[in-house]
Amino acid sequence: MDNLTHSLVGLALGELTHRLLPAEAGAAGAGTRRRLLLTGAALASNFPDLDLVLTALAPAPLGYLLHHRGHTHTLLYALPQALVLLAALWLCWPAARALLRTSAPARHGLLAATVIGLLLHFGMDALNVYGIHPFAPFDARWYYGDMVFIVEPVFWVALGTPLAAQVANRSWRRLLLGLFLALPALFVFAGFLQWGSLAGLAAVWALAVLLTRRVNERAALLAGVALACGFVLLQGAMAERARGQLRAALRQSDPAATILDLPLSAFPANPLCWGMVAIMREGLDGYRVRRGILSLAPGITPAAHCPAAIGSVHVAHSPAALAWAWEERGSVMALRTLRSRDCRADAWLRFARAPSFAGGAATDVRFGPPGVPNFSTLDLAPQIVPPCPRDLPRWGYPRADLLGMP
């Protein structure tokens, strides 16, 4: 997920943890504890993304593809990260250090907020099509949620609005509340959101403000957390429905092909529209990768009316529920030969779930069609080949089924 979402998740965790703990003896201690829990949980919710500093260890794009969401996104390394963060807070914050020496609730709350914040980072990242490998080094495979877009305004509005409504300074409170309503509106004009999605987000914003004013801040924040969790559950159910419809359509159109994988990319605040990729095995040596859009309610939003800005998917205007925009056929033997002869391609294939090799470049079409370079694109054109990248994580190959690996 984006770091604004990670930060809001951490702030909500810190605020709720503070409110659930027994009260501190004095107002100064209570204020310090609240600031400490908010800071600790927000930092923990972003801490694993410090692996971005490791991307320079390998040439682009391999450094980003293999080191980001790497070792810091595994359960094994959660404990060392928690210890480093807790030590930094202890050493750099004298007032927090004094409080932690005397207050058991503050110690327990900070420990819980830090550990849960790290785990929430892993869980949020696991929701989208990018994937993580949380059980490495014992299991180096990628795991994909395929249910929530990597930048999701539902989380911004559901969590950010009740948090902004608690800001004491009136000017800052109004500015932040306006920001959490304005950002989705900008997404509409940029082509990422439909007007119906904006209306739903505006209703969530208004509900959060109303609950804060008419009930209390805790109720508004709990409602935001419940709505965010409910949205994830809804997206999971709709993703399964989309995958079932896609699988049925593929079997009907090409019953002889074997469906290997169906990566799904959600649309922001839109459970009806889904970007889709199909990877299929055809015959003894063939495979095919297809990319398009699926609408679960074509009577309301046909596939052609889903926001075109997401992933640069453009399909012909029609009332159909399923629209294919691109496809590529390849040779399994050629793919295996490329991996064995080109160490850069071998490293790239440890990330690529939907590989395309059109135009002399390797691109994972989960993130865009060939011919439109994205962060996954690796130039394979003949040139002076640099030395093989060293010290790369040995993640499992997403397309091990095509590469002939167990």
Image (cartoon, helix red, strand yellow):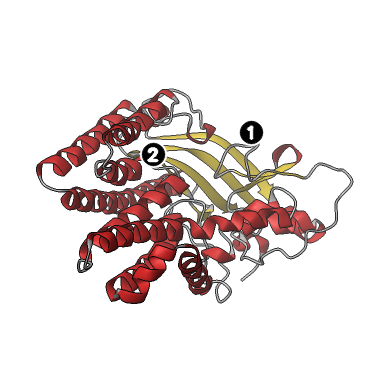
Structural crowding at the residue carrying mark 1, measured as other residues with C-alpha within 10 Å and reported as few (<14), some (14–19) or many (≥20): few
Q: In which quarter of the image is residue 66?
A: bottom right
| Amino acid, disc 1 | Val
Q: x and y percent of residue 40 in the render?
A: 41, 61
Q: Image check: 209 left or right of 397? A: left
Q: x and y percent of residue 121 in the render?
A: 43, 59
Q: Image check: 203 left or right of 359? A: left
Residue at point 66%, 67% (across, down): 394
Mark drawn on residue 86: none
Q: Which of marks 1 and 2 is nearer the N terminus?
A: 2
Q: What element carries label 2?
A: loop
| Amino acid, disc 2 | Pro
Residue at point 67%, 43% (across, down): 377
As drawn, the residue found furthest toward the right would be 384
Report the front residue among 212 and 204. Answer: 212
Q: In which quarter of the image is residue 105?
A: bottom left
Q: Residue under label 1, please give it.
A: 372
Q: Residue under label 2, please give it.
A: 268
Q: x and y percent of residue 300 in the render?
A: 28, 29
Q: x and y percent of residue 88 in the render?
A: 51, 66
Q: In which quarter of the image is residue 350?
A: bottom right
Report the front residue among 128 and 170. Answer: 170
Residue 299 in sight in this render: no
Q: Image check: 168 left or right of 75? A: left
Structural crowding at the residue carrying mark 2, measured as other residues with C-alpha within 10 Å and reported as few (<14), some (14–19) or many (≥20): many
Alpha carbon separation for disc pair 1 and 2: 21 Å
Quarter placement of the C terminus = bottom right
